[in-house]
Image (tube, grey):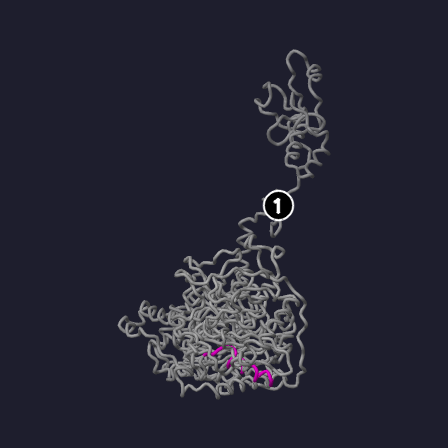
Amino acid sequence: MSEHRRKPPQPQGGGRAAARRGQPQPGPSAGRREAPRDATGSPSEPYGTGGEESPFGSRAEARRATQRGNAGGRRRAADGAGHGGSGGGGGRRGGPQGPGGPGRGRGRAPEPAKKRIIDYPRAGRYGAKRWVPSWKLVTGLFIGFTGSLVVAAGVGYALVGIPDIGKTAKAQNNVYYWADGSEMVATGGEANRQIIGYAAIPKEMRWAVMSAENKTFETDSGVDPMGIARAFVNMAKGGQTQGGSTITQQYVKNAMLEDQSQTVSRKLRELFVSIKVGAKVPKEDIMAGYLNSAYYGRNAYGIQAAAHAYFDKDATKLNPSECAFLAAVLKGATYYDPAGAVSIDSSATPEANRKRAEERWRWILTEEVKDGRLDAATRAKYTKFPEIKSPRTNAALGGQVGYLVDLVNSYLVNNSDKTGITETKLRQGGLQIHTTFDKKKVDALEAAVKKVQKANIKPKLRPKTDKYVQFGGASVNPDSGAIEAIYGGVDATKHFTDNADQTGAQVGSTFKPFVLAAAMSWGVRDPDGDPTQAQDERTVVSPKSLYSGKNKLKIKDYDGTDWTDDKGQEWLQTNDGGQSLNPPTYQIDLREAMRESVNSAYVQLGMDVGLDKVKDSVLRAGIKESSLASSRFPSFSLGTSSPSAIRMAGAYATFAASGKQRDPYSVEKVTDKDGTVFQHDKIAKTVEAFTSKVADNVTDVLKTVVEKGTGTNAQLPGREVAGKTGTTDGNKSAWFVGYTPQLSTAIGMYRLDDDETKKNREFLEMYGTGGEETIHGASFPSQIWRDYMRVALKGQPAKAFPTPEDIGQIINEAPSPTPTPSATESATESPSPTPSATLTSPSPTPTETCRKFDFRCNNGNDNGGTDIGGTDGGVTTSPTATATTPTAPASTGSTRGNGNGGGGLLGGSG
């Protein structure tokens, strides 16, 4: 008899009927097994007797709960199937069974999930656990990915070949064109390369390169995984991918010059080639190939060409010291050639490059000793940096052409983010470069300089005063910013610094127009107000405003308190020649003060406006901040900074263009075999540096300088001219910067030792230079400016400057307080004709006889208390101080020690 038909035991004292009445009726899903005895209140109680009713009304409810995927619902459904009640059946384990007796429940269990090849998201997991991969999945994916890489690497390795170094690194010419489209010069493809055998390469050279670049070259596999990783990271960041490579990788890179694109595919190809070369090419061949293909600067490819370029000898005759130097140059000739490369990077000056080269040269020799490749006794012999020959360049780059090409190359490379032309791409060649240079104007500027040199500068006759005299000049179109002409020096193959682009010579009083522009733009501060007053709290200045023209004027801060330096010294501003103007009140308006180049008036004006606003005016006009001196000292207004001729011409062009500033540029467009690479029109922009009201008023004031002031020597009959003279303390530099509506030109003159390999070169005084007692902006610079502009503007119509609108209020219209009449021991005179570190000769006393260029005798001289030595704050011999560590002003006023931010000698990029 089946279990479910067995009669339940009869309860005591009630009979079968009583038992039936006291228990629920058995359901169809009653369990089949008897419950354990301890599962009920009575050992004889049947499964299900006295148990809970099922939470579900029927099997359908249980099934629906299961389908909802509720684990608790499924468990309750199972429990309900095992319980009594309406359809509750007994489960397989635990729980009381229904009255039908023990047995299987009739409710369906959920079907098991179908298995998937990749169990993700994971079945049977809920919430975040569904998305956590199993270890099996992770392991499988890793194995699959690694296998794919191995297959890809194998295919890549099989497809690449070993490059032939003798057939690579072939550069093409770049062709440069004048502004009119005619060819200027084709250069760049004449690579100097001479391949020599491994045996001819000194072992000291091999040692130096290994110690400097790849110590494990002789034993490694040819690739550096960490270096490759760094390259990929840098490439992802958009930076340079060079650095960290082995000699083998560098060899491969040199052999793949036809493709120097910074792409992942090229880097992968280079990696596979490096692995194959490391496995199949002997180390001797790799080393010889690398040293024969590497670029050492000076257009020299290979160790043999480099030996001749730097030491004028064969590679076999190089000593360990010279080898260490050439190994240093391999890090980057632009920054390690002691001759400098300012045409590529303004920071690559001869002084900076020599310092870098010496430090790396010394380090390489020391590393060779550490690596056991050079004994200490041999190392001790080389304590002096090897003597480097001056670079020799292509004869086609002689005269001014070399400076023009350098300026163009510098513009393209320094703006590579806009031009798309890197130094490597430029060196590879194949470019047609259309410049802004007007051949007629370039020739005219050179002719004007040579005329003055031939007639006045005689170094053999007057070596103490005329030796080392240099000139620099530049012309900029105000309407576009195009650089139309430059004068960089006597010859680009003999004098290597472009004097138009970078000199380090301070510009003197040519800075005063920026002070006036700041006063007209921002206004002077309220003496009772906060130092950082807003513009609506200031008073805009009229050119009729009155200031003191007294010599040794005690300079005050805007609030009327005496200005003092870090040591508590007062500032007594001197005028040229120690002259005071307009006694006894000494009042002079700003127009006259500009015309006569009166220092005291403009230094005090700069303090009233705020030197931060003067600096802002300078930057707005287009001067680079890297060329500026510290603006902490009053003499900042007198031109202690050292911008280039190009930047000064560009800044004055801003005034000529009624306040519209356009950065000077030298390239109109670049094309190659595939079409246009770069076009300036697409990046050109115009910024309003000053309102037309401000700029036109500055121009109107500068017109009086040329009409009847220090700049009369620059007059052009029939044309309106505006300009300013400038001379620095110690008579060490002289400038004239002027413009017409069509062209802005700056001319600078100074004395500086032409040997660029010397350390700490100093600007020299020009007392007696050219047979003149002193040199100033109204002398030779203005003469060159005039002679050049006559030719440059020939055939162009004479244009008038815009008529200026009235501007500002007359400041100090009431009589000013009488200035302090004498100096105290604690005061700082700036500048002073007394003996000092920068001025050893007193300023000359004006005589009754008219001298050459004497503007007060209507000859255009700058004499008579304006721009002769002691005018502009001074150039000193110290090129090392920076703006962050200024020293107190000496008796000459402002010095480079006062924080000249121009970077010292040859600092201040144009």
Q: Residue at x 64, y 15 (%)?
A: 11
Q: Quadrant of residue 794?
A: bottom right
Q: Where does residue 837 sit, x and y in percent of width and height? A: 38, 70
**Considering only vertical position in the picture, is 433 above or below 875?**
below
> Does residue 329 appear anywhere in the picture?
no
- Counting other residues with Cα less than 10 Å from the Cα at mark 1, is it few (<14), some (14-19), or many (20 or more)? some
| Residue 592 shows up from this direction | yes
Residue toward you, 54 or 328: 328
Does 884 sit left or right of 411 as displayed? left
Magenta stretch encompasses residue 193: no
Residue toward you, 768 or 695: 768
| Pointer 1 residue | 123
Mark 1 belongs to which amino acid? Ala
Q: Is residue 384 left or right of residue 794?
A: left
Segment colored magenta = 774-791
Instruction: Label 1, secondary structure: give it.
Output: loop
> Does the stretch in magenta take in 785?
yes
Left/right of residue 621 with respect to residue 372 in the rendered view: right
Q: Position of residue 475 (x, y in %)?
A: 58, 78
Rendering coords of residue 107 (x, y %):
69, 34
541 relative to 378, above or below = above
Q: How many marks?
A: 1
